[in-house]
Image (cartoon, grey):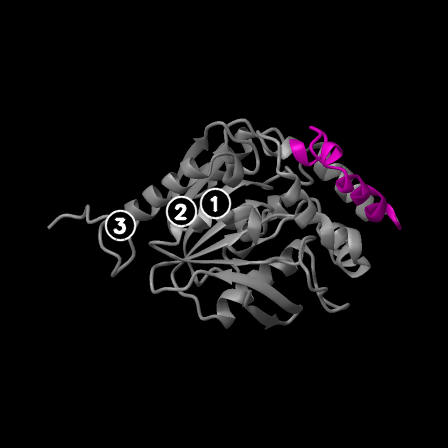
Amino acid sequence: MPEIELSAGTIDYEDTGGDGPVMVLAHGLGFDESVWVDVVAELRSDFRVLVPVLPIGSHRRPMRPDADLSAHGVARLLAEFMDRLELNDVTLVQNDAGTAQLLVGVRDERVARLVLTSCEALDNYPPGLQGRLLCAAGRVPGGLFLLVQSFRFPFLARMETSLGGMAKRPLPKELIARWYRPLLTSRHIRRDLAKFLRSTRKGCYLEAAGNLRAFTRPALVAWGAEDRMMPPATGRRLAALLRDSRYVEIPDARTLVQLDNPAALTAEIRRFVEEHPLPGEGGGRDGGGEE
């Protein structure tokens, strides 16, 4: 994978290349670029798709000890990533974590279209039992180390009160092992995630919602219809705050909509892009524009 040096440290990222419209996919806590693999495969023929491995638990390279890894700090790293690669007119897609919302009205000049899939928002932080347990563990010395030991055993990780509650179908044990290997093997990676958990304020997403009303560019809010950790009611409230938005529920999906129903999610993203073309993009991806 290519890598890039940012102010907090070096991060890896996936880049499909090409000269198509740019799409940046952002993952949540404890995941890496592989959580988006099916969506990338569906979109890469028409878009340049980039997936940065953000330093929130499944990253392979520890950040600098003094790095700001709060939710706001990670949002700034996402903006810095787009700046350093000179990405313009980006369609920014967020899942699980709510960090993309923190760019609105602050560092959103490179974002032309915003897609929020099931994610932390408004007063839903920390989200669900899983989120509350994770935040509590991150605040107790040694707590995070003890909590992640359960991910050594796929049957424990797949429990409804753990990672399994975020997906409709059993998650492959290979992915679980991949996502949690850094936390299990590196105290520096655990340090980075603990910094996020300790420094992200409970009300940060509710405060950020005040900027959403001023976001005039197109937005799509695509929520898992069966999400329990990020309730669809939160998604509907979020969509109501955005001026030019459409709300849709992805059937047969929970929080990890990109794994549960990637075909439905990518179809909605494609429809969204086609409905909101940028100058030079034309009226459709498949020659469907008017003559």
Q: Is residue 103 left or right of residue 145?
A: left
Q: Are the residues at dot 2 and dot 1 in contact (C-beta closer than 8 Å)?
A: yes
Instruction: Pick whichever, 97 or 25, lies toward us.
Output: 25
* Crowding at mark 3 (Cα within 10 Å: few <14, some 14-19, many 20+): some
| Residue at the front extreme of this rendering | 174
Q: CA distance from mark 1 to mark 3?
A: 19 Å
Q: Is residue 270 magenta?
A: no
Q: Residues within 10 Å of mark 2 (few under 14, many from 20)?
A: some
Instruction: Say left or right for 130 vs 228.
Output: right
Q: Residue at x 53, y 30 (%)?
A: 232
Chief SS of the magenta region: helix
Q: Which residue is mark 1?
A: 38
Q: CA distance from mark 2 to mark 1?
A: 6 Å
| Residue type of the residue flagged with mark 1 | Asp
Callout 1 secondary element: helix
Q: Which mark is residue 285?
A: 3
